[in-house]
Amino acid sequence: MNYWLFKSEPSAFSIDDLRQRPKQTEHWDGVRNYQVRNQLHNDIKQGDLAFFYHSSCAPPGIAGIMQVVKNGYPDFTAWDKQSDHYDPKSTPTTPRWYMVDVKFIEKFPRLITLDEIKRQPKLKQMPILKKGNRLSITPVTTQEWKIIVGLAK
């Protein structure tokens, strides 16, 4: 099992939105970065756990935990001309983008803010803290996972 951090703007899709979906499950669509697309297609697997990170808000931070419940498959929003994620170069026969399905596991009692993460010496290597990182999904080590879960408790 691997650990991940998935970013979403809460104004677009929040951990509460995930919790309110039928079966508390939803597809994670709209990724339009090739590095992250490759992770969704090849590396992120059913059973993996992920932090749900609220980004582009005040304050940004980790809101809770979700689990990947379906391996990567073509992102059908790329074929929908009405979607914000439409890509005319992606087709059902030659998909360009991928997504996974995730399930709500837990909302933390409080947000673990980006500032709090920055203050933890053992979290200094997290990709989310690296200057210029704009990836919407990044790996989390087992040690980083345990530290953040500990902060949440």
Image (tube, grey):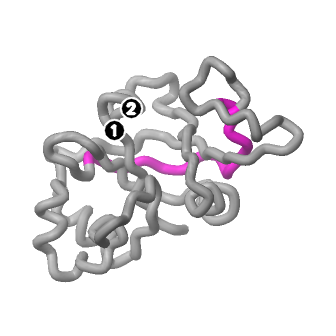
Q: Where is residue 62 in the image (x, y as percent from the top left)?
A: 26, 52
Q: Is residue 14 magenta?
A: no
Dots 2 and 1: beta carbons under 8 Å?
A: yes
Q: Is residue 77 magenta?
A: yes
Q: Mark 1 points at which residue?
A: 9
Q: Residue 149 carries which label?
A: none
In which image quadrant can residue 9 be found?
top left
Pick the residue in front: 30 or 112: 30
Asked if residue 23 is positioned above or below residue 113 in the image, the reply reads above
The quadrant of the rendering that contains the C terminus is bottom left
| Alpha-carbon span between mark 2 and mark 1 | 6 Å
In which image quadrant can residue 132 be found?
bottom left
- Circle 2 packing at 10 Å, graded few (<14), some (14-19), many (20+), is few
Q: Which residue does the image show at 29% across and 70% down from the upper left?
A: 131
Judging from the image, what secondary structure is the residue with disc 2 in? loop
Q: Mark 2 points at which residue?
A: 13
Q: Which residue does the image show at 57% across and 47% down from the upper left?
A: 32
Is residue 5 left or right of 39 when viewed as pictured? left
Magenta-drawn segment: 63-78
Q: Which residue does the image show at 18% across and 54% down from the upper left?
A: 112
Mark 1 is on which residue type?
Answer: Glu
Mark 2 is on which residue type?
Answer: Phe
- Circle 1 packing at 10 Å, graded few (<14), some (14-19), many (20+), is some
- Classified by dominant secondary structure, the portion drawn in magenta counts as strand
Judging from the image, what secondary structure is the residue with disc 1 in? loop
